[in-house]
Every structure is written in structure tokens, then in C-alpha cells.
Amino acid sequence: MKNLLNYSKLWSLFLGLSILFFTACDEGEEEEPTPEPTASFTFAPNTPEVGQEITFTSSSENANSFSWSFGDGSTGSGENATHTYESAGDFTVTLVASGEGGNVTAEETVTVAEPEPQADPVEIYFADNTGDVFTMQKISGLGLETTIETAFETTGYTIQVFYDENNDKIYYSDDDNGQVIRVNPDGSGQEVVAEDIAGPRGLAVNEDASQLFVADRGADEILSVDLATGAKTVLYDSTDLANAIGDGVQPVAFLPEGLTFHNGELFFTCVDFDAETLWKAAADGSNLERLLAYGDAGFGYAVIVDTENDILIFDDADTNNLLSSAFDGSDINEVVGTDDYTYGIGIDYVTSKIYWSTRDGSVKRANRDGSEVETLVSADEGRVNRGLVVVPIN
């Protein structure tokens, strides 16, 4: 009987331990709960300006989907995002980070400021022959606080100035010494590239800057100069010009002044009576023709190519206007009034401004449609200004 009782107790004990063991095993095999995501982000730059791209970087955890709202009606997706604001102000940026554990939201305020005013990306160089020391003056800070300072001294009385943008070189005509000088915009590296010229005026170089073209008023010639050797070639002389007029009234002289080069062709002005006004020729010495006579466009001292609009812009000193025309001389239009003879014309294509310098000593600019004329150098200063160029700021 005792044995039966013992077996019964042992069986009960065994059953109890078994239940406890299996219960413990079941509890150990329960799945971990799915963690909830967290949401947070940073952005750079910390103080953005209007129009500046901002990068938003999520530092969220346990999330696999991201939705952005930038506070200006724009949205985005992805763990990281970029955005640009078109106006200044405070914007609440919201990130919704989603994962298996749910959705969470983070917010940050982005303060967007108006950009600091910037000066126009050009400087204006003009020849100043005032007094006994002749200089090239530089106008900078355009659009903000304009300053005028001496860039460098020139070697003589300067009539025309040309800027070679491809090589960042300024050329100017030294009428006192009958030469053409090439120089860096800071005044360093001045060198004579052409000499023994009777009256150097308009200047231009070809595409690879291997040839310099010079309007020689003193000799009634258009010259080509090999910039490697300095050798000069007469492309056109007074006889060629007279032959181009043919049976028309012949001038006593031609007096070429302004000159420009474009796509293998030269365009130049002549200012003597009956030689006016705008001429065209191939840069190889052929196909000379007079595009516009005095009755078409007066006479003038400067001509440039507007490469954006594919037109010529030139001075009409008879009416004190800048005019434009097609390359064949057609479609003549008034650009802007100038008040006096114009010796230098330049265009800033970035800000869409046209600049000019006149015989009365003033330097002015306007929108390219001729509106909003602004005086940069007043005629009251009594300067003796001539050529002008626009030099981009690197």
C-alpha cells in the first residue's frame, strides 16, 4: 500500500514539473514586439537664401518610407530630399517616417532669407586722355556702389579699345606713338603688338587671336597684323575704297574709325565727307562693299557686333544715336540716344545692358532696348574719354 502511495506522489510530481517546463518553453518562444519608428532630420545650409538648393537628410530609425512637406505647397519623397524656395520667409518642413511599427512625424522650421545684393558681373574699362598722364579707367561695383579707379597708365593718347575675352587681353590704340598695345586687365604685361601705324583707330582680333585688324585713319587703310611676327598686310587702301564706290561721288579721304570682326568678315566705319558710313569686307582682303551711306545712317566712330541678336550696333554721330542693322545693312533701328559722338560701345549680356562712352567725357549705360539710361561718368567731370570695353569678372 505504501508503494502505491509513493508512485502516486511521484506521478503527480512528474506531471507538475512537465506542465511547468512546457509553460516556460512557450513563454520563451513569444515574438518580440515590432519597434515603433522614430523621425528626425537635418538640413543644409542652415541659413539658406531664396533660390538656393537645400538638402534635407533623414536620421529616422525603423522606417522604410518617407514623405516630405516643405511648407510652401511642395512635397517630396525618399529618405533624403532637396528643395528650393522661391520666396523668403519661415517654412515648416514636415517629415512623416513610416515603418512596420507605425507612422511618426518630425517638424523643423526653415528660415529662408533674401539673397544679398550682388554687383553686376562686369567691369567697364575706358580710355581717359585727360591731362598729361593718359590712363585706362575701370568702373566696378555696378549695381551697388560704383567706383572708378585707374586700372593702368597707357603709353599714349588712346582712341579705341578692344577686349579679347577668349584670352583675357585688352588691346588699345596709342595714337601718339602709332602703335597698338596688348595688356592684361590689371595693367601687367604691356607689350607692343603693332607699330609704325599712321593713325591707329578701331581694333579687332580673329577667332584664335592670330590676327589683329586695325583701322588706320592716318593712311586710309585697313590692316591685318600677324600677332606672332608683327608683320603688317594692307587689306584695303583708299584705292580699293574708291573702286567700291565706283561712279559715285569720291571723297578726298576715307578716315576709317570704328572696326569689328565677325565670322570672317570686317565691318568698319569711315567719317570723311562722302566716305560715310558703314563698310563690309572679307577679312582676307576681298568682297569690299559700302553697306550704308551718309543718307542711310549718318557717320560714326564705333561699331560692334551684338552676338546674341546677330546684329550690328554702331554710332551715328550726325544724330547722336546708336543704331542697329542686319549684317547686310538692312533693318536699321534706333537703339538709344547718346548726346555726342560715341567712341566706345559694349554689351553685358548677363544683365542685358549696353554701355557707351562719348566725346563729351561721359560714360553711360541703358537697358538694351534703350530704356533707363544711367550716367556712370558725367560730362561735368571734364574727362577726355574715348574707347570703352566691357570685361567680365572671372
Image (cartoon, rainbow, N blue to C red):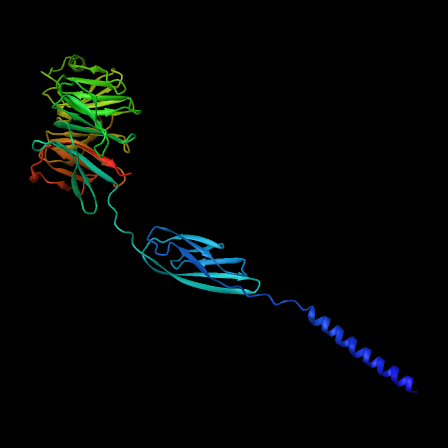
Please tell me whether residue 14 is drawn above or below residue 92 in the rendered image. Answer: below
Work out whether residue 391 can be spotted: yes
Image quadrant in which you'd find residue 119 = top left
Front one among 273 and 152: 152
* Whole-percent x, y for residue 68 in the image: 45, 58
User: As drawn, is 281 to the left or to the right of 248?
Assistant: right
Work out whether residue 335 can be spotted: no
Image quadrant in which you'd find residue 94 = bottom left
Please tell me whether residue 11 is drawn above or below residue 245 in the rendered image. Answer: below
Q: Residue at x 14, y 37 (%)?
A: 363
Please tell me whether residue 347 is drawn above or below residue 174 in the rendered image. Answer: below
Please tell me whether residue 182 is drawn above or below residue 1 in the rendered image. Answer: above
Which image quarter is the N terminus in? bottom right
* Whole-percent x, y for residue 71 in the image: 39, 60
* Whole-percent x, y for residue 36 in the image: 55, 66
Residue furthest out toward the right: 1
Q: Residue at x 18, y 19 (%)?
A: 195
Which image quarter is the C terminus in? top left
User: As drawn, is 204 to the left or to the right of 41?
Assistant: left
Front one among 315 and 394: 394
